[in-house]
Image: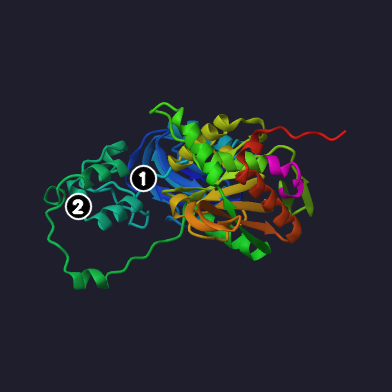
Amino acid sequence: MSQYVFKMPDLGEGTVEAEIVAWHTQPGANVAEDQIIVEVMTDKAAVEVPAPVSGRVLSITGVPGDKVAVGSPLVVFETDAAEAGAGAELVAAAVAPAAPAPAAQSTAASAPASAPAAALSPGRIMASPANRRRAREAGIDLKSVAGSGPGGRIVRNDLIAAGARPAAAVSGAQAVPVSAAVAETSEIKVIGVRRLIAERMSEAKRNIPHFAYVEEVDVTELDALRQHLNTGLQKSEPALTYLPLVILALVRVLDSFPQCNVLYDAARGVLVRHRAVHVGVATQTPDGLKVPVVRNAQALDLWELAAQIRRASERARSNKATREELVGSTITVTSLGKLGGIASTPVINAPEVAIVGLNKAVERPVVRQGAVVVRRIMNLSSSFDHRFVDGYDAAAMIQALKDLLEHPATIFIPKVKVQ
């Protein structure tokens, strides 16, 4: 037998360290080669790291939230000499500077690796911290839940199934007195996607002077068109929302306002203007806000655009989106749907310079031609990087977008080129 030290691999693209998100093994556990042992996160993506050899885990480095430098010891295995030799070749390839970054992402997580180096007890409940919290909040006794994940791990669907059972069948524990429940607190370490979101939002608000602009838009005609188009769909087909119509109009508007379809390269002090429109669609997921990208929106028709938006959003929510699907947007559109409120101040998705937000569409009394009538109104809340987009241009762009949305037929009419 011999010891084999597995070091934090180079995950590519200049990565110098990675954050521990979740351990899938513990000291004392036996693992097989290629078995997922840890999930880590760089500033680019979440990555599942497999074991390079088969053997017993002697020690691990770090707990969720800790950052480990590339090339630093991560796991020490006890294995035979032949396994160690084969694993050394694999790790050498993994830490080589030219190694490609793994694209897989996962929301799975195991218990924090802060326990002493002892073998796992046979009766240990296998569940991530997030699922333990969900079970605690739902009053579900994990001992009564059968895990359907790898190695009997309890996954989210197991908790959903358990929550559908009568309370008495889920847990035999006595109810906690209200006074005791009120006194309880818990600490949640900010790690993984939530940490990355926090860092990027802080950086955006700290470095970008936001210019906010809110405009009221009469979407009565747009809504009538949307409902008419939905009547032609099969029952199995998802209904058309406002989002693809707004993005289609935005693509048309950006022809006249190319300074808003720009990325700012701060390192070089250069604005990179794009002809293609790659739209980021801000999407709420169980892990927090993600921005999957619909590429070349200018080349898509309404139905293609709607399909691409659904696909991108669904892959982000199910954590199937690759890193390439979450980067490269040139302008972002965000919508809170039915929770959209009256107005908001969306945070710019750096290095972009503009973001447009959809608020809730509601019927309001408005004055038209001297009479009070009921119209469907939706506010557009936008933010611009005031360093590169003047307030006049920002307002003019949203006014142009408003004009298209209030006269939706013009969204589909090609521009007439003046000779």
Image point 26% across, 73% down: which residue? Answer: 183
Which of pointers 1 and 2 lies earlier in the amino acid sequence?
A: 1
Magenta region, main secondary structure: helix
Percent position of residue 236, x then y: 39, 28
Quarter of the rendering occupied by the C terminus: top right
User: Who is closer to the viewer here, 17 or 370?
Assistant: 370
> As displayed, is residue 62 above or below residue 147?
below
How packed is label 1: few (under 14 Cα within 10 Å), some, or many (20 or more)? many
> As displayed, is residue 339 above or below residue 293?
below
In the figure, residue 207 lies in which quadrant? bottom right
Image point 51% across, 42% down: which residue? Answer: 223
Report the magenta residues as a range. Answer: 252-260
Q: Can residue 292 be seen in this view?
A: no
Q: Classify mark 1: helix, strand or loop.
A: loop
Of tags 1 and 2, the one toward the viewer is 2
Residue furthest right in the image: 419
Mark 2 residue type: Asp
Percent position of residue 353, x then y: 69, 53
Would you say 380 lies left or right of 413 here? Answer: left
In the figure, residue 343 lies in which quadrant? bottom right
Q: Do the residues labelled 1 and 2 touch (CB within 8 Å)?
A: no
Percent position of residue 47, x then y: 50, 42
Q: How far apart are marks 1 and 2 (CA)?
A: 23 Å
Total marks shown come to 2
- Tell me the tag on residue 240: none
Q: Mark 2 points at which residue?
A: 141
Q: Mark 1 points at which residue?
A: 25
Mark 1 residue type: Thr
